[in-house]
Image (cartoon, rainbow, N blue to C red):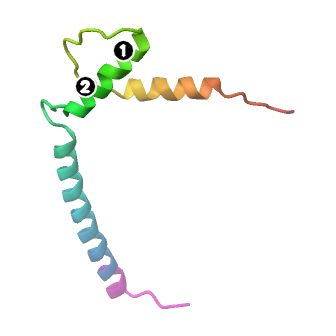
Amino acid sequence: MSQVTIETLSAEIAQLKQMLELLTQRLSTVETKAEPADEVLSEETLIAIAAAVAAYLGHKPKIKQIRLVRSASWAQEGRVSIQASHRINVQR
């Protein structure tokens, strides 16, 4: 079994502090990029949305506005829907 010294632990703590600082910086840049004030959708995305709406409704509608909704409730509702559709067999 190896001998753990105070110097070894101090070096590891210093290394962990550096890693934490780097990860904190990266996280702040990702958060900044992930939340634009007014995100512009590409033309391809708009065409895909229009095609999906037309396929669902059966005719080509006039789309007046598209806005992005970022909400955790959408994700949660989707998970609940998928989980509810699975059949769970519990045997006693």
Bounds of the magenta segment: 1-10
Q: Is residue 74 magenta?
A: no
Residue found 62% across the figure and 23% down from its top: 84
Whether residue 63 is visible here, answered yes or no, is yes
User: As drawn, which residue projects farthest toward the left?
Assistant: 37
User: In terms of sequence position, does the residue under pointer 2 or pointer 1 come before the other?
Assistant: 1
Q: Which mark is residue 68?
A: 2
Q: Tell me: 49 left or right of 84.
A: left
In three-dimensional space, the C-alpha distance between marks 2 and 1, rounded to whole angstroms, equals: 19 Å
Most foreground residue, 19 or 81? 81
Q: Kindly state the secondary structure of the residue where label 2 is placed.
A: loop
Whether residue 70 is visible here, answered yes or no, is no
The mark closer to the camera, 2 or 1, is: 1
State whether residue 88 is above or below residue 59.
below
As shown in the figure, which amino acid type bears the numbered disc 2? Leu
Residue found 32% across the figure and 87% down from its top: 7
Q: Tell me: 33 left or right of 69.
A: left
Q: Is residue 8 magenta?
A: yes
Q: Tell me: 52 left or right of 15.
A: right
Q: Specify the quadrant of the image occupied by residue 35.
A: top left
As shown in the figure, which amino acid type bears the numbered disc 1? Ala
Q: Which mark is residue 54?
A: 1
